């Protein structure tokens, strides 16, 4: 599917395509001569990427996208974002190049890091305490299911990514260090030790500078990852000498998994060894990327294209922190919203800080649904180019479904509230009258939204509902609305109902009309905002709405 969109993609303006063009310019610059680059660029721009690859075999080498995972903890919402953003850019790159230039996404597990902090959300913490500072692939599994804590977390990571349908290649730091894959770059770090120190030491405090080395040796005696100075270097033997925990001068090779690199040199060495072309990271790592770029260049590598996204904040506008446990977990989001709504939230405005709390889920869900509907309208019109800048196209990795949901999430929430619905069956009884023949089987996305709405209402809306009595102006307007609803012909649709809602508000003298709708929500539904009121009445039913109005005007809703 992506192979047929190259020509249309040339004009796409959304941020993933901007990043894709930077990556394309990078590989043309690194792999081709000036003359070759001009011709290849012209062919790709004309939608002839396959011809460009056939003409210049250097373009057949895969473009490498990468994201990292800290294997000292379980996968979480941030892990989803780490994999989502490069996947979105990768999809744009594939469309831009007609899927003719191969790509791969490496999910790299930093599972050779020493376990410095014991997670709070695992059993047998005393056992982990005994293994503190060992590489996480040598720390015993507190769950008793795998050969190590690192292997356990890697298995959870892969199941997590597979569950969301990510296309990726998994790599383990332990495997790369012990198999010899990193040997060449590790020997280069040894050879260029002084250059790397000259880059790193100015970034450190005085005390840290006195003991810093890019190499973290693993003690042959205790198995712990040590942060100790490098006392001697032997280039011919490929070894370093350090003082072990008991003070013994110890010599180990820098190859074969006997050492681990400090994280910023490690990042640079990984980029160099794996020839990474693109990596996204948080704004808080801008300085670290800058330093790692210099180390990468010192190692003879070319730093990847870097994309920095803003951080998520909690409900108090504090940075989300794994150690604090503030913000949302992936499980919490998925109790109230679809994975697509989370991917949409990650997609939108990546350069702007966003709150990551429960109250963003309904809005994100409805915005995603609106974008999907807009995309399908353009698709029906045959406008392929317009699809590519639609967030839903990126959320679905270039293959969006042809059908969304006929009912918004906010409307479902208000339906649950007004009907005091406690089961999906009650909601479907309303939905099937509004959409004849609709079933969970014929409307699979809506069926999921029903479940999410019931959960969200029970946990967040119901405990905070607060009805109020209408003012005199509001009472008169609501009575007028009731009369207008009674006068509508049988079978009046949502648009006809909405017109009468507008007319009642105008006749009631509400300025702006927003105040009128807020009054309806607060008086009838016990909340300050809601969906399009005409659609709500159409699905809830005019007779039931009139009963609701009567109860509100009689003061029964306020009494509870």
Image: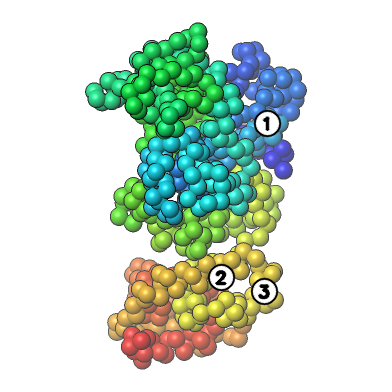
Q: Quadrant of the C terminus?
A: bottom left
Question: Could you tell which of marks 3 and 1 lies nearer the N-terminus?
Answer: 1
Packing grade of label 3 (10 A; few <14, some 14-19, many >=20) is some
Residue at image mark 2:
450
Q: Quadrant of the N terminus?
A: top right
For residue 102, the mark is 1
Q: Nearer the viewer, mark 3 or mark 2?
A: 2
Residue 197 seen: yes
- On screen, residue 358 above or below 244: below
What x and y, as percent, mark residue 188?
A: 50, 15
In the image, what residue occupies the spot 59% across and 24% down? 181
Residue lying furthest top: 236
For residue 438, the mark is 3
| Foreground pick, 159 / 56 | 159
In the image, what residue occupies the spot 42% across and 86% down? 549
In the image, what residue occupies the spot 59% across and 55% down? 372
SS of the residue under disc 3: loop
In the image, what residue occupies the spot 75% across and 23% down? 54
């Amino acid at each position: 599917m992506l192979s047929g969109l190259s020509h249309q993609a040339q004009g796409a303006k959304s941020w993933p395509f901007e990043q894709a063009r930077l990556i394309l310019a990078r590989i043309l610059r690194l792999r081709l001569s000036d003359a070759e680059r001009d011709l290849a660029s012209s062919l790709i721009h004309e939608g002839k990427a396959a011809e460009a690859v056939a003409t210049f075999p250097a373009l057949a080498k895969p473009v490498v996208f990468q994201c990292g995972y800290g294997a000292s903890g379980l996968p979480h919402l941030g892990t989803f974002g780490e994999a989502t953003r490069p996947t979105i850019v990768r999809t744009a790159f594939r469309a831009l190049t007609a899927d003719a230039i191969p790509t791969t996404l490496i999910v790299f597990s930093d599972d050779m890091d020493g376990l410095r902090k014991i997670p709070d959300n695992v059993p047998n913490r005393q056992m982990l305490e005994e293994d503190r500072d060992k590489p996480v692939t040598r720390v015993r599994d507190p769950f008793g299911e795998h050969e190590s804590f690192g292997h356990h977390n890697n298995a959870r990571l892969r199941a997590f990514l597979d569950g969301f349908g990510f296309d990726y290649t998994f790599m383990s730091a332990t495997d790369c260090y012990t198999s010899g894959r990193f040997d060449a770059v590790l020997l280069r770090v040894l050879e260029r030790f002084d250059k790397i120190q000259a880059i790193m030491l100015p970034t450190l405090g005085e005390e840290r500078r006195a003991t810093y080395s890019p190499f973290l040796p693993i003690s042959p005696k205790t198995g712990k990852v040590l942060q100790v100075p490098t006392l001697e270097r032997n280039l011919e033997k490929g070894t370093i000498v350090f003082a072990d925990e008991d003070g013994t001068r110890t010599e180990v090779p820098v190859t074969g998994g006997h050492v681990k690199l400090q994280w910023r040199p490690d990042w640079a060495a990984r980029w160099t060894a794996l020839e990474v072309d693109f990596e996204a990271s948080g704004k808080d790592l801008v300085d670290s990327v800058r330093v790692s770029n210099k180390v990468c260049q010192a190692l003879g590598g070319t730093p990847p294209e870097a994309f920095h996204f803003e951080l998520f904040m909690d409900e108090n506008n504090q940075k989300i922190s794994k150690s604090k446990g503030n913000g949302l977990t992936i499980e919490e989001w998925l109790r109230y919203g679809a994975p697509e709504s989370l991917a949409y939230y990650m997609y939108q405005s990546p350069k702007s800080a966003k709150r990551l709390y429960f109250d963003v889920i309904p809005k994100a869900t409805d915005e995603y649904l609106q974008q999907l509907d807009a995309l399908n309208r353009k698709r029906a019109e045959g406008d392929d180019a317009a699809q590519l800048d639609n967030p839903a196209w990126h959320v679905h990795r270039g293959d969006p479904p042809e059908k969304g949901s006929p009912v918004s999430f906010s409307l479902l929430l208000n339906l649950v509230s007004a009907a005091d619905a406690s089961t999906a069956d009650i909601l479907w009884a309303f939905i099937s009258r509004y959409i004849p023949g609709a079933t969970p089987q014929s409307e699979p996305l809506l069926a999921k939204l029903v479940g999410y709405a019931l959960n969200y209402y029970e946990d967040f809306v119901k405990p905070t509902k607060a009805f109020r009595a209408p003012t005199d102006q509001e009472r008169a307007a609501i009575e007028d609305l009731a009369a207008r609803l009674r006068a509508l012909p049988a079978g009046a649709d949502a648009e006809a109902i909405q017109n009468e809602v507008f007319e009642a508000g105008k006749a009631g003298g509400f300025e702006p009309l927003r105040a009128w709708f807020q009054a309806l929500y607060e008086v009838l539904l016990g909340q300050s905002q809601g969906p399009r009121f005409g659609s709500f009445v159409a699905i809830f039913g005019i007779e039931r709405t009139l009963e609701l109005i009567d109860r509100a005007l009689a003061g029964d809703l306020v009494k509870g």
